[in-house]
Image (spheres, helix red, strand yellow):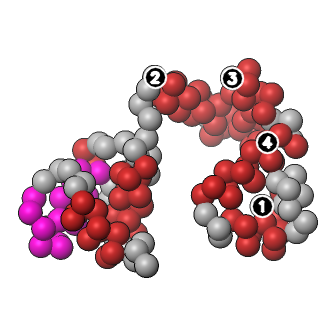
Amino acid sequence: MGSNARPAGFDSAAAMVAAMRGGEDAQILAMARFLRSSKLHHALQRRDWAAFARGYNGPAYARNQYDIKLEQSYLRLASGSLPDLQWRAAQIALLYLGFSPGRIDGVIGRRTREALNGFRLQAGLPAGGELEGPCYLALCAKAGLLP
């Protein structure tokens, strides 16, 4: 939101949008600055999901169960189930190309494998559920992710 430009460390909404176009690193840095300036980092440090959700989403956070979703995501990631960034990029490309990989989370599940197999079939690649070099390159090229 444009009103978050200053808390995120920008002089204007336009400056924030320009920085966000620079990529994920700039977006994460801006989010970290926003959380710190809004004092929401304290709730994250305490793992007080309700306080964080209330401060970030407003008083109606419970209606959408944001606090519960935050806790579930934290527990999944804290258990060592870290997302694979290459698979995450593939999921984004698959979604962009009209396949249905499920959640864009870097976790390889049934829907992601089915979407990848659909892409392989459409692209004339051999069947398989892995994201080896030639398949990944073909997927990124088709989605316009390569220069």
Q: Earlier in the sequence, mark 1 or mark 3?
A: 1
Note whether residue 59 is visible: no
Q: Earlier in the sequence, mark 2 or mark 1?
A: 1
Nearest to viewer (mark 2 / mark 1):
2
Q: Nearer the viewer, residue 65 or 110?
A: 110
Label 3: few (<14), some (14–19) or many (≥20) C-alpha neighbours in 10 Å:
some
Q: How far apart, in angstroms, are the residues tagged by discs 2 and 3?
A: 15 Å
Residue where numbered disc 1 is placed: 1
Determine which of the numbered discs, if any, sits on residue 79 in the image. Answer: 2
Segment colored magenta: 112-127
Q: Marks 1 and 3: CB-CB under 8 Å?
A: no
Q: Earlier in the sequence, mark 4 or mark 2?
A: 4
Identify the amino acid type marked 2. Ser
Identify the amino acid type marked 3. Arg
Q: Marks 2 and 1: CB-CB under 8 Å?
A: no
Determine which of the numbered discs, if any, sits on residue 35 in the image. Answer: 4
- At mark 2, the secondary structure is loop
